[in-house]
Every structure is written in C-alpha cells, then in structure tokens.
Image (cartoon, helix red, strand yellow):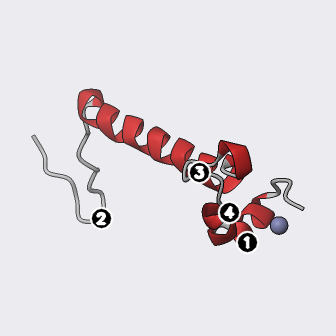
C-alpha cells in the first residue's frame, strides 16, 4: 500500500446518514428565509397585521424580484 504523494490528498468521505440532518436543516432554513423575504406581508404575516418583517427585508425582497409596490 502506497501513501498518497504530497498534494494528492483526498477529502474524507462523509456518510449519507450524517448528511441528511444537514440537508433537512438547510431546506427548512431556506424555506423560512423564502417565506420571510417573499411572502410574509399583511394578512399572511407571522407577527400579526404588521409590516415589520416586510420593512426589514424590503431591499432583499426587491433584489430577489418579488412583487412589492
Ligand atoms: Zn418595495
């Protein structure tokens, strides 16, 4: 058995079962971010009938191309 030469190292493999929780967390975080940036407004607002979240993410909303005003 030969050891890899300098500069030819390989990344350690990661088992699928170890990656699933990270994948689920990333998807949930992405959906949460998508909701707060793109959808949370007025009647669909999580924090009642306020525009607090909408105003906080307003620039991101325009940057992402969501309809606004
Ligand atoms: Zn706007």
The residue at which mark 4 appears reads as 51
Q: Position of residue 42 (x, y in %)?
A: 72, 51
Mark 3 to mark 4 CA distance (whole Å): 9 Å
Q: Secondary structure at mark 2?
A: loop
The residue beneath circle 3 is: 48
Whether tag 1 and tag 3 are in contact, CB under 8 A, the answer is no
Sequence-first tag of 1 and 4:
4
Q: Nearer the viewer, mark 3 or mark 4?
A: 3
Q: Nearer the viewer, mark 3 or mark 2?
A: 3
Residue that badge 2 annotates: 7
Label 2 vs 1, first from the N-terminus = 2
* Mark before the other along the chain sequence, 1 or 3: 3
Q: Residue at 68% x, 63% y: name it.
A: 51
Q: Which residue is mark 1?
A: 59
Nearer to us in this view, 48 or 29:
48
Q: How many marks?
A: 4
Nearer the observer, disc 1 or disc 4?
Answer: 4
Q: Are marks 2 and 4 in contact (CB under 8 Å)?
A: no
Question: Closer to the observer: label 2 or label 1?
Answer: 1
Q: N-terminal of the two: label 3 or label 2?
A: 2
Q: Is mark 1 within 8 Å of ligand 1?
A: no
Left or right of 11? Residue 68 is right
Residue at 65% over, 53% down: 49
Which residue is at a point 22% across and 59% down the rendered structure image?
Answer: 5
Measure how far apart labels 1 and 3 are at the Cα level: 21 Å
- Which type of secondary structure does the marked residue at label 4 adopt? loop
Single out the mark in the foreground, 1 or 3. Answer: 3
Horizontal and vertical percent for residue 2?
A: 13, 46
Q: Is mark 4 within 8 Å of ligand 1?
A: no
- What residue sits 55% from the left and 42% below the top? 31
């Amino acid at each position: 058995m030969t050891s890899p030469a300098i500069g030819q190292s390989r990344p350690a493999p990661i088992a699928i079962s170890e990656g699933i929780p990270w994948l689920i967390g990333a998807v949930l975080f992405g959906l949460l971010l998508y909701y707060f940036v793109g959808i949370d407004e007025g009647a669909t607002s999580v924090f009642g009938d306020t525009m607090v979240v909408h105003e906080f993410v307003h620039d991101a909303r325009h940057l992402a191309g969501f309809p606004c005003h």
